[in-house]
């Protein structure tokens, strides 16, 4: 039972990070009908920027509590990620909005490689250790343990997702985003500035990716220039699993994907004598994704994108 609770905790932590990044994918797709495959690299930029801020804080303000340092790192990484993502939209995607779908896809892959290359030039090729600034004493829950970093991650992810739902459902910008996603032409006739909505969508997605990036590096104790590829691919899979274009689907898909990986790596690894364990946890998520899309192509909660023909 203790092992099961531990796997659930690990799955929720992992799934929360997937959900934050998946929201960026699903929001951009909902508004632009475009997949931003460079979004995983925005997570990487957030992690590296947060790490740089932490190193600076350890020099100029070494007596600050660890949680304060981590929060400052996250708050500092958010504008960096927003600037990168908005620049990507302005330079790479804006002129391709009416292009054939293959053009933005190829551009997104190129932008991903470009961002990784710039990150390698700035921060180097080698993994950079993340400083242990949070208290190391774990918290026991039903015989399982959770670190204080993971608790902070779950709290921040929950607050970010609740905040996003409130923004989309209760604010004027949220209504403009939903209107643009439903029918951009009609929204434009009603006075909605689609360019502002799209920029806001990229900015919000970047902020969520920045939180996920810093917490990912803190949870796994390192960061490096290519770290965004696999989490980005899995987060995209989570968005598709939940229903691309559906923000609730992205959240549910992320949590489910994290739980599948954690439980699969734990229990299936035990059943196979370690042949299929943590080193092969990627296959569990993608096998389930293939099964779900075979049986329900629109994802678990359904796609929320209008026909724009």
Image (tube, rainbow, N blue to C red):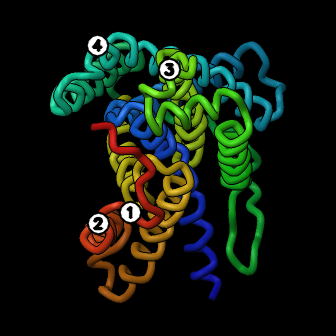
Q: Which quarter of the rendered picture does the C terminus lie within? A: top left
Say whether residue 35 is visible. Answer: no
| Vertical side of 236 occupied by 137: above or below | below
Quarter location, residue 50: top right
Where residue 139 sits in the image (x, y, percent)?
77, 64
Q: What distance separates the C-alpha of mark 4 from that of mark 2? A: 31 Å
Number of the label disc, if any, that sits on residue 9: none
Q: What distance separates the C-alpha of mark 3 from that of mark 1? A: 31 Å
Where residue 275 sits in the image (x, y, percent)?
27, 78
Of label 4 and label 3, which has the lower sequence position? 4
Residue labelled with disc 2: 293
Of label 2 and label 1, which has the lower sequence position? 2
Say whether residue 199 is visible. Answer: yes
Residue labelled with disc 4: 95
Q: Which quarter of the rendered picture does the N terminus lie within? A: bottom right
- Specify few, some or many for label 2: CA neighbours under 10 Å numbering under 14, 14-19, or 20 or more: some
Of label 1 and label 4, which has the lower sequence position? 4
Q: Residue at x 82, y 33 (%)?
A: 65
Number of the label disc, if any, that sits on residue 299: 1
Q: Residue at x 70, y 22 (%)?
A: 58
Does residue 160 appear left or right of residue 271 in this picture?
right
Residue labelled with disc 3: 189
**Residue nearer the viewer, 305 or 82:** 305
């Amino acid at each position: 039972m203790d092992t099961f609770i531990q796997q659930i905790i690990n799955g929720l932590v992992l799934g929360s990070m997937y959900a934050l990044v998946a929201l960026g994918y699903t929001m951009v797709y909902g508004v632009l009908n475009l997949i931003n495959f460079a979004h995983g690299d925005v997570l990487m930029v957030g992690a590296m920027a947060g790490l740089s801020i932490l190193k600076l804080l350890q020099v100029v303000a070494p007596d600050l509590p660890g949680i304060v340092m981590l929060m400052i790192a996250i708050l500092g990484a958010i504008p960096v990620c927003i600037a990168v993502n908005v620049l990507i939209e302005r330079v790479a995607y804006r002129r391709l909005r009416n292009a054939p779908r293959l053009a933005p896809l190829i551009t997104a892959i190129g932008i991903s490689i470009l961002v990784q290359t710039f990150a390698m030039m700035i921060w180097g090729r080698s993994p950079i250790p993340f400083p242990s600034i949070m208290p190391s004493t774990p918290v026991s829950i039903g015989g399982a343990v959770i670190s204080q970093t993971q608790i902070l991650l779950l709290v921040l992810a929950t607050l970010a997702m609740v905040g996003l739902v409130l923004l989309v459902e209760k604010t004027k910008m949220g209504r403009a985003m939903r209107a643009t996603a439903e029918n951009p032409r009609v929204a434009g006739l009603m006075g909605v500035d689609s360019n502002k909505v799209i920029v806001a969508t990229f900015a919000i997605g970047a902020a969520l990716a920045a939180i996920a990036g810093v917490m990912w590096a803190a949870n796994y104790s390192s960061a490096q220039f290519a770290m965004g590829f696999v989490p980005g691919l899995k987060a995209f899979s989570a968005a598709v699993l939940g229903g691309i274009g559906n923000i609730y689907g992205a959240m549910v898909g992320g949590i489910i994907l994290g739980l599948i990986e954690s439980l699969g790596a734990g229990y299936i690894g035990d059943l196979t004598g370690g042949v299929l364990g943590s080193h092969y946890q990627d296959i569990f998520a993608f096998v389930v994704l293939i099964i779900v899309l075979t049986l329900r192509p629109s994802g678990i909660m359904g796609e929320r994108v209008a026909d724009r023909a």
